[in-house]
Image (cartoon, helix red, strand yellow):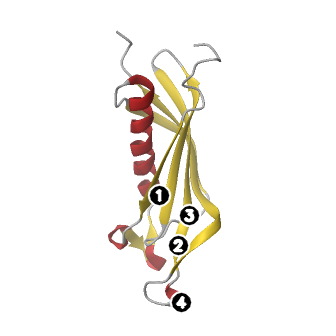
Amino acid sequence: MSEQDPRLGLTVTHRRYVPYAHAHYAGNLVDGAYALGLFGDVATEVCIRTDGDEGLFAGYSDVRFTAPIRAGDVVEVTAQVARVGSRSRTLELSCAVVCRGRPDRGESAAEVLDPPIVAVTATGTVVVPPAP
């Protein structure tokens, strides 16, 4: 595909509250697979927008867990199309914590993080059916 492909650079973002039911470890930590599941959700929307199909995730490369995700966080998950092949799309993915609970300030206290904390990054490849 041409470097001028209009799908290049398409960005999709989802935000989600991380419920306490997802905490698996001390300190209300959430396992890294939680972010990977969210990457699947945002990649599905990318495929729908670019190709009119939900597509399938073929694999990840360069997955990096750089900061914890905790129950009570609000995360922002973003996918950007970096490469368009005939049936594959390479996505740059990130999961950033944009809000975090502050139990030290009260049972339901929380704050907006400025700047957000990037917790997970990855490169992913999705595949879509051949064009008709």
The residue to which callout 1 is attached is 32
Q: Amino acid at mark 1?
A: Gly
The Cα atoms of the two marked residues, 1 and 2, are separated by 17 Å
Give the farthest residue toward the top: 132
Front position among marks 1 and 4 = 4
57 is higher (above) or lower (below) than 86? below
Q: Residues within 10 Å of mark 2 (few under 14, many from 20)?
A: many
97 is higher (above) or lower (below) than 3? below
- SS category of the residue bearing label 4: helix
The residue to which callout 4 is attached is 105
Tell me the residue at 44%/72% (across/down). Answer: 72
Q: Which image quarter: residue 92?
A: top right
Front position among marks 1 and 2 = 2
The Cα atoms of the two marked residues, 2 and 4, are separated by 12 Å
The Cα atoms of the two marked residues, 3 and 4, are separated by 18 Å
Q: Earlier in the sequence, mark 1 or mark 4?
A: 1
Tell me if label 3 and label 1 are in contact, CB under 8 Å: no
Tell me if label 1 and label 2 are in contact, CB under 8 Å: no
Q: Earlier in the sequence, mark 1 or mark 2?
A: 1
73 is higher (above) or lower (below) than 90? below
Residue 98, disc: 3
Q: Amino acid at mark 2?
A: Arg
Residue 132: horizontal and vertical position, in percent? 34, 9
Residue 100, disc: 2
Residue 85: horizontal and vertical position, in percent? 53, 18
Tell me the residue at 49%/86% (across/down). Answer: 103
The Cα atoms of the two marked residues, 3 and 1, are separated by 17 Å
